[in-house]
Structure formats: C-alpha cells, structure tokens
Amino acid sequence: MSSSLGRFLEFSIRTPDIIESLSYYKLIGFTEREIGDVWTHKYAVVGDGLLNIGLHERVFDAPAVTFVHPDLAKHARSMTDHGFDFSFMRLDEDVFNELGLPDRDGHMVTMLEARTFSGSDEFEDDSILGTWFELSLPARDAVRSARFWAAVAPKLLRVREEPTTHMRFDAGGAALGLSESIALKAPSLCFRCHDKEALFAAIERHSLPHEKFPGFEGAFVALQAPEGTMLYAFDEDFLGEPIEVEESDDLSEFPT
C-alpha cells in the first residue's frame, strides 16, 4: 500500500541566513539543486542522491517533512472526509497549491502539488557523513504517534521495543523514524558513515561544530548545521538488518 501523502520531496528547514546554510551543506558534500520560481522567499535545495534538504529563508512551522501529491485539491477533500485536520490549506487556481497538517507530536507534514526543484534522483556521491538512512522524529509515545503515520504511510519497515521504542515507516520513499529517545530533541537526520577518519579530518579542517558520542542511539558524532539541524553519524544502522513487516491499514494494531 502506497503513502497517501504522495512522494517524499524534501526535509524543509527554516534558516535565517540561506547563504550560510547553503555553504555549509555544500562544504560537507551535498549538491545544490536547480530550483524553480515557485516561492517568493529565498530558497535553495541540496541533495546527496537519497535525501533532499530544502532551505527556506522565511518564517514557517519548521522543520517540515514535505511531499508531492498530484491533484492536491481533490486529495485534500478525501483526507478531510477521512477525519484529517489541516493547519493550513492554500488551494486555488491562482496560487501554488499546498497544505499542511501536524502529526501527533506536532511535527509539520507539508504536501505540495508539484516539485519545487529539479535534479537527478539517481545515486550520487555521499556527503562526508556517509549514506542517509533515516529522518528521525522525537515521539513522546511512539505507538500513539504511529496511529497517524500508519494511516498515511502504512508500510512499517522496522520496530524495536527495547531499550526505547523506535518505529520506522516508509513515508513516500523516505525512511521516517519515530523515536522515544530522550537524547533526540528535534527532527534530525541519520547517516551511516563509511570513513570515520575522513569525517573527523573534515571536521577539524573546517572547524565544524560537533559533539562526540551525543547519546542518541550510539551515534559516534553529531554535527550541527548553522540553522540548528542535527546530523548524526553512525557506524551502522542502529536498527540492524531489515526485517519483513506486513503492510496494514488496520489501526487497531496501534492502540491508543
């Protein structure tokens, strides 16, 4: 069963200085994308072949997990009929159609009718952090939070119950994690590092703000981008090898 949110587009971040943020991500190995003229505010996108990060120099409810869904107005009516409440909705022939709704922990989910940038989705070189494997969202109660995500992204990839509950969904092509770890303070990005020596050399060479062994899921280092985004580097995926989990739209599997 596919995600009713559409396809994952970008991790949308608010930045007070788009030049500073853009320079940082390019410095650590991300590639700048060619953007369209959709937004009136300053906007840039960087990617590594798997993950795209949207940098927005404007005030909005950020960060946001952003998706693209065609015929958004019709789809919004269907979601409303199924009980979803939107925090904002701009749907008109004269505007770029977009809408947003929070998950159960208040993390913003945004849906757009069309892409806002171009660029190859094919594999590109990883950043110095390695291969991106999860967008992690802090959750007060992961099982409760899963009731929202199971309804819109019913493919559950992995589940771990101890020492803290962690659930991972396929959200329109993005691996999205719900974490009860108290060390995770905000939506963050997780990478599997292939060359720790090169990473630490780059950190030292460019004087990149970082913290060794930050306490989140065994990460050996966390970098902090200029706008505050946390980037965690791991030796391996902390949930281990993939397991088969059946898809389901039966929310009784995720009791309140």
Image (cartoon, rainbow, N blue to C red):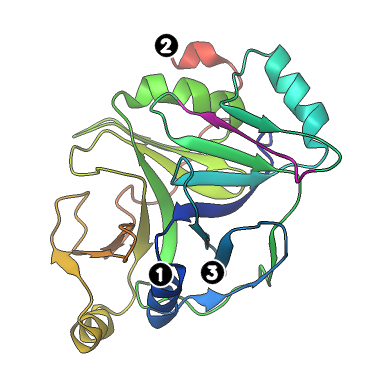
Q: Considering the numbered disc 3 on the image, is that residue within a helix, a strand or a loop? A: strand
Viewer-nearest of discs 1 and 3: 1
Quarter of the image for residue 37 reads: bottom right
The x and y percentages for residue 238 are: 29, 51
Q: Quick one: 196 or 119, which is closer to the camera? A: 119
Residue kind at label 2, given as amino acid type: Pro
The crowd level at tag 1 (other Cα within 10 Å; few <14, some 14-19, many 20+) is: many
Above or below, 17 relative to 110: below
Q: Quick one: 198 or 99, which is closer to the camera? A: 99
Residues under numbered marks 1 and 3 in contact, where contact means CB atoms less than 8 Å apart: no
Residues under numbered marks 2 and 3 in contact, where contact means CB atoms less than 8 Å apart: no
Q: Quick one: 132 or 206, which is closer to the camera? A: 206
The x and y percentages for residue 18 are: 46, 68
Give residue 21's mark. Answer: 1
Residue topped by disc 3: 47
Above or below, 27 relative to 137: below
Distance, label 2 to label 1, CA atoms, is 40 Å
The residue lying at 59 percent from left, 19 percent from top is 85
Residue kind at label 1, given as amino acid type: Ser
